Image: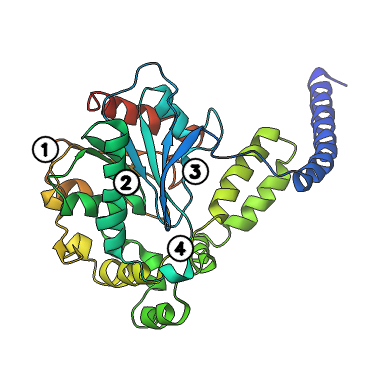
Amino acid sequence: MNALAELDLASLQERMQTEVQRAIQRSIKGVEYFSTSGPTLGSTPKDILHSRGTMNLYHYRPLAKEVYRVPVLIVMATTNRGYILDMVSGQSFIEFLLKRGYDVYMLDWTPPKPEERCLRMEDYVLDFIPDCIRRVQQDSGEQDVSVIGYCFGGVLSLLYGSVFPDGPMKNLICFTTPIDFREMKLFQNFADRRYFDVDRLVDSVGNVPSEMIQSSFEMLRPASRAIGQIQLWDNIWNDEYVKSYRMFDRWATDTLPLAGEYFRTITKDLMWDNKLFNGTMSVGGRAADLSKIKLPLLHAVAEHDHIVPYEAARHLIPMVGSNEKEEVILKGGHVSLVAGANAVKRLWPKLDNWLCGRST
């Protein structure tokens, strides 16, 4: 047997041994997977500053000796839980901000109760957000507030900023925020006014069930859950892979229902009439003109976002009236842009560099 053949045989034996060991580990780890609950998420120490209806306002405890003057209020999307930004230590955007010296607050959401089916867009934009900003001002002792809006939280923040252009917002950061809803193609198909009777839905069931919201997201990539489970089994011997899978899978399935009247407005004004893009959007009778926003603005978009494609997000920077405005396109998807290893390397440092000099 020549040296090359001996090397091939040794390599084959090594690969076989590795696969046997992994097969054994899959059996062991598979039992562990079903008998354990996974890592605790959203555990960065915080206090509830205020709670009212579907709204929770958190204040995170500082992790740095010196803190920037201007506090940061994060406005979460109304369909998702805020712990996507606070997964576990070392993979927490909140923890990163705190260690960099920012004073961090979060406006997070809970499922609307049946009696809250009548919550409207103006309740979110003209009540919840202003209420939280006032409380952040009172708690921090500062008048200026920087706002970070994730996905539809960015839409709500933009609406607030356009209605109150002279308000206390000092800086606005939007993550993956849609502007042109025509470009959210599959959602447009779901909500086609020829077939989708939103009035009948809301009038019949009240709040839109979380199962319906989650199904619409999953339909964007119908095979992703099955593929993910196959990949999980293939990598179940790898503790770090399983930990990451459990974190993101839990968040992805922890979808919130939407208040009925709020959903009706989203469907009619944004999905059907595209009023935010067309410049005809109003909230509670007040014009929501993006050109009135003059404050420094950063918009971070994901190169491979299947939920908010770049074509749906790219119009924000041209439409706002700010002199200081920047769009940054980063590798990743809708979630990996803000959370996980990709975000740690790309988005978080970029945000810190942009915001630090504007927070003094």
Residue 9 percent across, percent down from the top left: 84, 27
Considering depth in this image, is 332 or 175 the residue closer to the camera? 175
- Is there a contact, CB below 8 Å, between mark 4 and mark 3? no
Asked which quadrant contains residue 295, the reply is top left
Kindly state the secondary structure of the residue where label 2 is placed.
Answer: helix
Local crowd size for mark 2, using a 10 Å CA cut-off: few (<14), some (14–19), many (≥20): many
Kindly state the secondary structure of the residue where label 1 is placed.
Answer: loop
What's under tag 4, amino acid-wise?
Pro
Of mark 3 and mark 2, the one earlier in the sequence is 3
Q: Which residue is mark 1?
A: 323
Distance (Cα) linking label 1 and label 3 = 31 Å
Considering depth in this image, is 194 or 81 the residue closer to the camera? 81
Local crowd size for mark 1, using a 10 Å CA cut-off: few (<14), some (14–19), many (≥20): few
What's under tag 3, amino acid-wise?
Ile
Kindly state the secondary structure of the residue where label 4 is placed.
Answer: loop
Q: Which residue is mark 3?
A: 84
Q: Which residue is mark 4?
A: 112
What's under tag 1, amino acid-wise?
Asn
Local crowd size for mark 4, using a 10 Å CA cut-off: few (<14), some (14–19), many (≥20): many
**Residue, far right:** 1
Q: Which residue is mark 2?
A: 132
Work out which quarter of the rendered image holds the N terminus and state it: top right
